Image: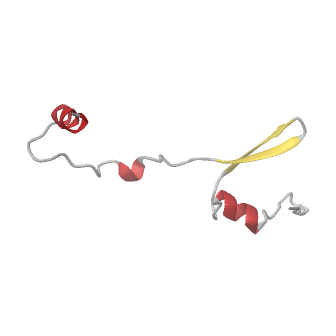
Amino acid sequence: MRAKMTSKGQITLPKACRDRLGLKTGTLLDFEVVDGVLIGQKVQVEDVFHKWRGRGKLPAGSDVDTYIERVRG
């Protein structure tokens, strides 16, 4: 796939590339040049576990150590 650079140094990534990589508006990318090849990589800016923190609830009257011991057998 090809993309043409504008006079401002901008390109439009082909839709097929954006879809395969899950790139959305506002996604940050890091670029580097390795042996004359441009490499772009998505930046993981959010904590991937953030949405899960605080979701787990212990059964009433249990502490963490007792619960883990019980579920692990």
Q: Residue at x 58, y 47 (%)?
A: 44
> Residue 8 versus residue 61: which sits nearer the camera?
61
Count of marks, rendered view = 0
Horizontal arrangement in the rendering, residue 3 relative to residue 62 (left or right) = right
Residue extending farthest to the left is 61
Is residue 34 depicted above or below 26 in this figure? above
* Picture quadrant of residue 4: bottom right
Horizontal arrangement in the rendering, residue 64 relative to residue 15 (left or right) = left
Question: Picture coordinates of residue 49 (x, y %)?
Answer: 42, 46
Is residue 25 depicted above or below 73 in this figure? below
* Picture quadrant of residue 66: top left
Residue extending farthest to the front is 73
Image quarter in which the C terminus is found: top left
Residue extending farthest to the bottom is 15
> Residue 27 versus residue 6: which sits nearer the camera?
27
Q: Residue at x 12, y 40 (%)?
A: 62
Question: Picture coordinates of residue 29 (x, y %)?
Answer: 69, 50
Q: Residue at x 18, y 45 (%)?
A: 58
Image quarter in which the N terminus is found: bottom right
Horizontal arrangement in the rendering, residue 22 relative to residue 5 (left or right) = left
Question: Picture coordinates of residue 14 (x, y %)?
Answer: 79, 65
> Residue 13 versus residue 9: which sits nearer the camera?
13
